[in-house]
Every structure is written in structure tokens, then in C-alpha cells.
Image (cartoon, coloured by chain):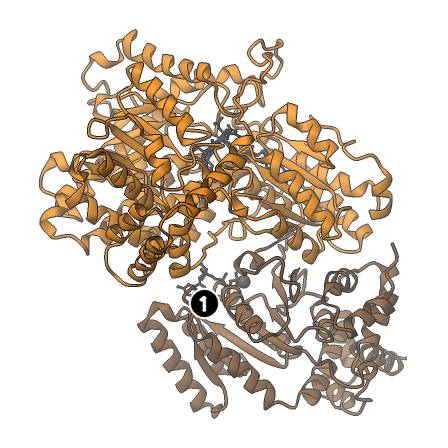
Chain colours: A brown, B orange
Amino acid sequence: MAVDPAALARRLRDGDLTVAPAVLNLVESRAPKDQEAIAALLAAVSPAALGGEAPGHLVGVTGPPGAGKSTLLSALLHGWRERGRSVAVLAVDPSSKRSGGALLGDRARIDVDPADRAVFIRSMAAGERLGGLAPATRAAAHALAAAFDVVVIETVGVGQSETEIAEVADTVAVVVQPGSGDTLQFIKSGIMEIPDVLVVTKADLGQVATRARRDLHAALRSLGARGTAVVAVSSLPPAQGIDRLLDALEAHRGATDVPSRRLQARRLHALADFVEEHGARGLRALGGRRAAEKWLATTDPALDVGSLERALAERAAAAAG
Amino acid sequence: MMRTYAGHSTAAKSNELYRRNLAKGQTGLSIAFDLPTQTGYDADDELARGEVGKVGVPVAHKGDMSALLDGIPLDKMNTSMTINATAAWLLALYIVTAEEQGVAPAQLQGTTQNDIIKEYLSRGTYAFPPAPSMRLIADMVAYTVEEVPKWNPINICSYHLQEAGATPVQEIAYAMSTAIAVLDEVRARVPQDLMGKVFSRISFFVNAGVRFIEEHAKLRAMGRLWDELGRERYGVEDPKQRRFRYGVQVNSLGLTEAQPENNVQRIVLEALAVTLGRDARARALQLPAWNEALGLPRPWDQQWALRLQQVLAFETDLLEYPDIFEGSVVMDGLVNELLEGARAEMAIVAEHGGAVEAVPYMKAALVESHRERIRRIESGELKVVGQNVFTETEPSPLTASGDGGIMTVDPEVEQHQREAVRAWRSGRDQAAVDAALAEVARVAAGEENIMPATIAAARAGATTGEWAQALRDAFGQYRGPTGVGEAAGAGVDDDAALEQIRDEVERVSEALGRRLKILVGKPGLDGHSNGAEQIAVAARDAGMEVVYEGIRLTPSQIASSAVQEGVHVVGLSILSGSHRELIPSVLEALREAGAGDVPVVVGGIIPPSDEQALREAGVAAVYTPKDFNITQIMRDIVGLLASGSRSDRESSPKGSLSRR
Ligand code: B12
Ligand SMILES: Nc1nc2c(ncn2[C@@H]2O[C@H](COP(=O)(O)OP(=O)(O)OP(=O)(O)O)[C@@H](O)[C@H]2O)c(=O)[nH]1
Ligand SMILES: [Mg+2]
């Protein structure tokens, strides 16, 4: 059965949320025969085609395994729904290196009404990628942002994967649980970028949570990141702090120049995809990472990731030849 | 004490059965509740579909309880209730029923199972999150020790752990860790001078497998550990109060569908494990029936199980000697080995913060042990007679009878019970019920003992579903950990069969455009998760992407997940007997959601007589316990998807898959 990318794009633009599964089935496809349709779909929901950035708020939720990301998402979902927002969740889980298989467990933690058409949850396997996202996550998120008010991505929590999510999301929330000194160390030493919002989960555990919140706050201040909100939440019922977190996420988005952040994200992502495909040799052909980034900054802002990646490839080929 | 675990259909029918059994000389009652009652839903709840009156009796309010116990003198009865999440509620109904008979709480004797940790780990009839569940248990212990002093408020169960795959060491360690969690919680609520009494009220419900020498050693080890715990951790001085008291149901997980007559030998050997040595002999023994893996036993099957016990007790010299292992170096060595292992495992649980916090760890450990057990059966390392060795057989006269060798429940019961509970609600003083439930909610949010408000709500005529809903609102919904994500993958690398499937999955995924994705679903209240878990883990190890959300989903939840996740195949697992209602509902929900072309495979306890109907309804393949080779099942599933792209699959005849 051939899918019609134009029809899918039209339904997304019209805000038809029931199109989400079909969109995902297509953008996740690696079959050569589908690549043209995928490119067409993405072009049809690109900023150039939409006449501006897709309206949905792209939120990244990341943090170490077991920190409470999915449970938090469950609570956030209810909050967003109460505020009348439609929400799509892309939950990424790791794949087994040996078998390629994956157990997609996040969904089980997210409690939703199956009859609620304004909520869409899709589990994605990271495959061989290490950055915390699945191969199609970025494309899927951008496509869904044309129709959903909020698109949330839960990454594989592997300590340092937060960089890739920062290249996709408008707002990145890093989730830590009380007593996890690692995150503090990562932030202090600069291994991890400073998040837009820091969430300390399991506030119901009491004192340890309060202490964790205080420590993180102090660390951020010492790094001069006074603007980063630190919110303590408890996601298990009776949930606490969820409204404050929703406000913090929205406040961040309100204070962000979304078009330029997304433009930057598209360029960095194209570069990442290019490196994935062409490796270190490709990067050398472009004169190194910094030169490549500089060149990207001169490209047409309307270009989508696919076009940018192709442009990089052409440039590298020209340099090599 | 000998009693049979019983209850089915309706309170009135079960009452007849109890009276018949008591007239035959049975000395106590053992009440089996249906799954909606056990999980806190009334018969008219969507989740109750297909389960009302199936594996036990539905009890929705004090009217049902008094019909169930009509004409049975509660001051003389010793009543055991297999009830956990809603134990406080059922005990309240029992107390109110006694009150109406003019019997005071202090005269009541019996046991509520009430071990919630093993519900998360194995049995699946939990209703609330762990912390408030532990509080309900502690409230009950504190209440009964003063007000219903002859009641055993809790029975720590290791039985269910072995049924979920636990090794002897795990069975000992997790049960003892559970006891510690409960006792620590109670210690905070009762005066220290009552701790000896509390300790002595705690009894165990254990398992005994077919390796009966080791199993006997396990029981001796548990006795030693219990004595130690009482003395060292809880300061219990009186050795009598530290005695390890336990009842047994012997292992059922190892009972086979293939050549089911062999189960009789297994059951007898398992019974030896808990009777051989007097120093570690069971107080009460329940034996399963020969047709355990086929479905619910009929009265004749139960009679046979009882006779096995009677032959052991009355014909052999088993009970005539003092402890026959006293001074045995071999037995002592075995016991010490188990003790050592158990202590190490208990230390790991303690490191996690105790049994409550360690539930996810223990669950994943059980899934892994079970996985290992299945691997050994598949490879032939673990021999199961009639299943993976000596499989040739003459036709069996036992399974040739017309009813398929099992008991079935009339589906009319559910309709009747739905109407009955609605009628009950419309016939009571609603204002009094509302006030009583508001009081339950208030107490739940605070720290007072839950029992008085619960008893008042029972008296006012509230229903099981209403009481549980009040607590769900206060405590929150809860979904237990599945253990599958954390469970380690296949340990063996050079497994040729596995390699071959992985190649095949890779090839089919290539053709599909995306990696083969399967949803494993458990519709309804059935808590038998072993099969679903093992299928999920095996599918991942075969290279598939697996969505598994755990037990207790409605058909519409399953259909919605299948569509949103874009899975290529849906696998459903039902063992409780509700497949006839629930599988067609899932198929219907899938069609409505626009996923009618996604193939559905089904596994569990499916009698051959139902298989045809399921296939006609559109199910592509049906698996039962005799299909013990999960690697082969994986091969079938991949084959199902390899047989063509979506469009030509529709034109190929469904159910053409061969079944071994
Ligand atoms: C183990 C067990 C339990 C354990 C379950 C632990 C757990 N977490 O799973 C415990 C002790 C908790 C338990 C409790 C109960 N049990 Co029980 N239990 C069994 C037992 C002995 C074995 C089931 C099992 O796990 N087998 C091992 C797994 C791997 O095999 P399997 O699930 O059959 O799966 C295989 C195939 O069926 C197939 N398959 C299964 N699912 C799927 C899914 C897919 C997608 C595919 C492709 C294949 C597939 O592939 C697997 C590989 O071989 C059976 C009897 C028996 N011997 O079969 C009774 C049995 C299922 N239990 C039964 C009952 C009545 C109960 C209780 C209601 C008793 C009570 N009143 O308290 C409770 C209810 C619990 C609940 N919440 O629902 C009855 C059901 C009767 C019926 N259908 O009419 C049975 C048949 C016993 C009997 N004869 O009475 N039980
Ligand atoms: N006490 C408490 N426990 C929580 C809270 N949030 C999550 N948990 C528990 O923490 C564990 C992990 O939660 P998840 O939501 O699965 O964590 P995650 O970060 O999504 O985990 P991965 O996806 O596996 O990395 C579960 O057992 C939750 O019940 C909370 O607010 N309080
Ligand atoms: Mg998660």
C-alpha cells in the first residue's frame, strides 16, 4: 500500500491528530522505496512550506536511567491535557547491541485514557545510535509539531546524551533523582551542557530531595546560570510541583527565540547526520567541524535538514575531488 | 487440617458448596474470590469483563458476604481467605457478617493472605502503590492483634515466587525480606511487648518443587532463618513464638499439559518434600490436580488430589518417626549452602532499601531465573518427562471425556452479577454510603488506622469497587514493574538457533522497512504474567522491538497502543479462562481502530475446543503450555510476517500456521 506524503502533510497541517501513527510508520522506514516519500513529507511540513516554524513546543526530557522520566511524563501529560494542549510523546529506549532487539518500556509508565485522541505515544528504539535518540526521532518530532501543541521526546538516559536532544528541542529538561551526584559533577565539569530546566524527581522522598535541589541550585549559580529553573516534583500520586514545572517549561519557551534555535538545531543536526554517514574523513574534507559550522551559518535559513546534509555532502565531494 | 480451596459463580452457589464440604467432614473454609473482587472492581466495571465468578466467588458487599456464609457458624469456623490488596475490606465484610450473626470479632478465627509484595512480584492482584499497601497491611496487623486476636492477619507467601521462576535461594530470601518489611512497619505501630505476639501470628505459605531433597533442605533453612530473625532483629524471647509455621501448596509450574497423568507422580514427590522430616513439616498441605495445566479441576480431580494426601498420611509410615534427617551431614550441608545463598541475596535486597524498594530488582531477577529455566528445558538440559523426553504416548483415556477434562463456568453468571450489584446500589441508603466513603477517604489521606472506617463503610453497604476506588483516589493508580526491560538477555552467544532467528528477523525487517515490532498484551484482570514476560524477552533477544505494558489492560488500551506504536503483530496472553470474552473484544477494538489487518497470535490456557472458535474469529495462531519451545514460537511469528507484505497477507488464509 503506497502512502501519499502530500495527504499526510495536509492532514498534519490541518491538525488531524489521528494521522500521527501513519506519519511515524513512514518516517521510521528505512526501505529505499520510501525515502522519496519521507523527503516529500518533511519538505511539506518544513518552515519554508509552513511559512514559519511549526507551532508545537518541542520539549526534551532527558536524564539518567530510572530517574523518573516516564513517570514524570505521565504527570505532565495530565497537566497539559488539563490546560487543553494536545501532546505527542516520542519515547526512546536503547537497543541491544547483540540482537538489535529492544524492550520499549516507557509506555508502561505513562498512564493515559485510550479514548483521548489528543494524546499520542510512540516508543522508538535507538538502534545503533549513541546520542540518545532514534534515527527518525528528529524528523518525527518536527513533523508532529505541525499538528500537536506539545511534542515531548524522552531520551535514553545515558549520562552524556543530552547534547543531541538539545539539537532537537526548544526546551530541554534534565531529570535527576535525589542523591545522584553524577549530574552535579557533569554540569560542574562541563561534560553536560547546562539544561534549560532542571527537574529533581521523587520529592516525596523528603530530605534527600530537598538537599539535591539545593545543591543543584548552588552549582548552577556558581556557573552563572541563574536563569535555569530548578523544580522539585513528585510524579507519583498525589503528584506535586507539576504545575510549577509546566509553567517553567512554558516560560522558557516564551523567553527563547525559537526560530533561531531551531535553525541552529537544523544545521547542527545536518552536520551530525553527515558525520554519521561520512565519518571523520568526510569532516576533514569540510575542513574540520568549526569550518563546517561556519559554512553552515551562511546557508539559506529555509533549508531543511535533508537539503543541508546533501549540501554538506556535495561540498565535501567537491573538496575531495 | 485438610480443606479445599473453593468458590465460584455466585455467593449462593459457593455457599451450597461450602455446606456440602462441611457436611463431608471438612474442618475449615478456604475462600477463593474472583479476580474483580481481589483487585477491587465491581462486576459492572469494564475491567471485570470475562472474569466475574470465574476463578472464585464475587463478593461486592455485605449482602454477598452474608449469602456466602449463610448458615455457617462463624464462631466455630476457621476461615482462610486468599485475599491481598482488598484484604482490609473483605475482613471488614467478614466482621460485619459475624456481627449480624451475633458473633464478636474476638471469636473469629482465620487467615487473610495479605502479602502484597508477592502480588507485585508474581500474583498480580495488587490495587495500590507499594507504600500505602504496606500501610494497609500494618493497619490490619495492628488492629487484629488487639481486636481479633485469633486472626492471622498475614501469610507471607513464597509459593508464588517459585511459580514465577524463583530458585530455592530466591524463594527463601525474598520471602524473609518481605517478612522483615512487614514487621518493621508494624513495629512502629505496636508496643514492644506485643512484638512477640505479632511475630508468632505470622505464618508462611511456601512451595515445594519436584527436587524434593533440596526443597526439604529449603524448609529447614527457612525455619532456621525465622528463628534467628525473631531472636536477633525483633527481640522475641519465647522460642514457641519463633517457631516457623507454614502451609504448603506444591509446585504447579512444573506440571505439564503433555501426558498430564505424569503430574500425579510429581505431586506425590513434591508432597514428600514438606512431610519427610518432622522438624520441618508443613501444618497444612494443598495439592494441585493432575489436570492443572489443562484448566480448572472438576470435583473428581480434586478428590483424587485429596486421596494422594490421604494415602501418604494413612497408608505409609511417613508420620511415625522423629526427624529422620537429624544428624545427616548431607542434609546439614545442603541447608547451610542455601542459608549462605539466601543471606547474600537478602543483603542485596537490604541494600536496595528493603523489600518494598527492591520490588523492581526482585521482579527482574525472577524473570531472569524463569528465563534460565526455560532455556534449560528447551536445550534438554532439564528433563521433563513426556514434554522434552519420552514424548511418545498411547492415546489417553483421561482426556478423552466429553468436557475436555476441565470445569467451566456459566457465562450467564457475569450478567446476573452485574445486575445484582446495580440493584444493590439502588436499594441502599446512599447518603450513609457517601458519608462512610468520605470518611474512608479522609482516613486514607492521614495516618489513622484504616480498619474502623472500613468496617463502617461495610456496614453502610458500600461495594468492593467503591471502597477500592476511594483508596485509588487517595493513593493513586499503580502499575507494577514488568521486570522484562532489566532482565538480562540470552546468556549464550553460540546458540545457533538464536543466531538463525536473528538473521531471519533482520531479513524480514529489511523487507518491512522497519525493524519487526511486536506488542505483547495482557487483556483483563488475569495476573499470569510469566508467559507474556518470557515471550517479550525472547522476542527482544530474537531481535524484535517489543512493546509490553504489563498486566491488566482493557481491549481498547491494547488496540490503541498497537495502532500508535505501529506494530507488525499483536500477541495476547490469557491464562485465567477469560479468552472467550476478551480475545474477540481485542480483535474488534483493533478493527475499530483501523488495525484489523495486524495479525494476532494468542497464548495461554486455551482448551482445544475453544481454539477453533478463536481462529474463526481471526486469530492467526494459538499456543498452549505444550508449546514449551519459545524459540520455535519466535520462528513461527517471524514466518507469519515473512509470508508476505501487508496487502498480500490479507488474501492469504488466516490460521494456516502449523501448530505443533
Ligand atoms: C504459574 C501459575 C500461577 C502463578 C503465576 C505467576 C505469574 N506471574 O505468571 C501464580 C501462583 C501467581 C498463579 C496464580 C493464580 N492462578 Co495460576 N497457574 C500457574 C500455572 C501453574 C503455570 C502458568 C505458567 O506460568 N506457565 C509457564 C509459562 C511460561 O507458560 P504459559 O503461560 O502457558 O506460556 C506458554 C504458552 O501458553 C504460550 N504463551 C503464553 N502466552 C503467550 C503469549 C503469546 C503472544 C504467545 C505467542 C504465546 C504465549 O507460550 C508459552 C511458552 O510455552 C498454571 C497451570 C499450568 N501448569 O499451566 C496455573 C493456572 C493458569 N492458574 C490458575 C488459577 C485459577 C490461578 C488463580 C486464580 C488461583 C487463585 N484463585 O488464587 C491465581 C490468579 C492470579 C491472577 N492474578 O490472575 C488456573 C486457570 C484456570 C482456567 N484457565 O480456567 C490454572 C490453569 C491452574 C488450574 N488448573 O487451576 N498461577
Ligand atoms: N517515590 C517516587 N518514585 C518515583 C517517582 N517517579 C518515578 N518513580 C519511580 O522510579 C522508577 C523509575 O521510573 P521511570 O519513570 O521508569 O524512570 P525513567 O527515567 O523513565 O527510566 P528509564 O526510561 O528506564 O531510563 C519507577 O519505579 C517509578 O515508580 C516519584 O516521584 N517518587
Ligand atoms: Mg523511561
Q: Quadrant of the N terminus of chain B?
A: top left
Q: Is residue B225 left or right of residue B410?
A: left
Q: Is residue A252 left or right of residue B609?
A: left
Horizontal and vertical percent for residue B425?
42, 47
Task: Say which residue appears at 52% left-offset and 37% top-offset.
Answer: B51
Residue that badge 1 annotates: A235
Q: Is residue B565 left or right of residue A234?
A: right
Question: Alpha-carbon neighbours of circle 1 within 10 Å: few (<14), some, or many (≥20)?
Answer: many
Answer whether residue B204 is visible to the viewer in this image.
yes
Closer to us: B26 or B462 = B462
Horizontal and vertical percent for residue A155?
59, 68
Q: Quadrant of the C terminus of chain B?
A: top right
Asked if disc 1 is less than 8 Å from ligand 2, the answer is yes
Closer to us: B569 or B98 = B98
* Residue A300 against residue A213 in the figure, above or below: below
Q: Quadrant of residue B247?
A: top left
Horizontal and vertical percent for residue A192?
53, 79
Answer whether residue B552 is visible to the viewer in this image.
no
Task: Say which residue appears at 75% left-offset and 68% top-offset.
Answer: A16
Q: Count the numbered circles shown.
A: 1
Task: Say which residue appears at 52% left-offset and 22% top-offset.
Answer: B407
